[in-house]
Image (cartoon, helix red, strand yellow):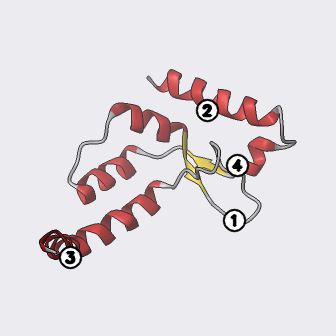
Amino acid sequence: MIHTAELIWQNIIDAGANRIDNFAELLNLQPGASEQEFRRLEETLGVTLPEEFKSFYSVYNGQIWNSDVEPAIRNLLLHQLQKLLIIGHFFRRNSTRMMTLNERLARN
């Protein structure tokens, strides 16, 4: 499966390189995620990540964004696992509040 993920990434990079010089460098892709990072994300979110997701992130662990970074796929930045952890923590802390808000909205 990792081979498929590598081919997908290579296709993304090749397609961008046809239209933008230095596209691969502009993506600002980070080295692949480790098994430890996957376990931490799974534990934080309380889920088992699909193997396809792990394969994709094993090749590159997202992008570090700044104003001159090209999105990997039209207007889509690939967040690093660390950023996904932060998002996961936010939703866990706020899930009760969000459910309460949704219940109130449903009543109206």
For the residue labelled by badge 2, is the local secondary structure a helix, a strand or a loop? Answer: helix
Name the residue that disc number 2 marks.
9
- Earlier in the chain: of badge 2 and badge 4, it is 2
Quarter of the picture containing the C terminus is: bottom left
For the residue labelled by badge 1, is the local secondary structure a helix, a strand or a loop? Answer: loop
Q: Is residue 96 left or right of residue 89?
A: left
User: Which numbered dot is residue 101?
Assistant: 3
> Image height check: is 14 above or below 49?
above
Q: In which quadrant of the rendered view does residue 64 lie?
A: bottom right
User: Which numbered dot is residue 27?
Assistant: 4
CA separation, marks 2 and 4?
11 Å
- Earlier in the chain: of badge 4 and badge 1, it is 4
For the residue labelled by badge 4, is the local secondary structure a helix, a strand or a loop? Answer: helix
Foreground: 51 or 17?
17
Name the residue that disc number 1 marks.
66
For the residue labelled by badge 3, is the local secondary structure a helix, a strand or a loop? Answer: helix
Q: Looking at the image, which residue is at 44% across and 61% down?
A: 82
CA separation, marks 3 and 1?
34 Å
> Image height check: is 54 above or below 101?
above
Report crowding for label 3: few under 14, some 14 to 19, many 20 or more residues within 10 A (C-alpha): few
Amino acid, disc 3: Leu
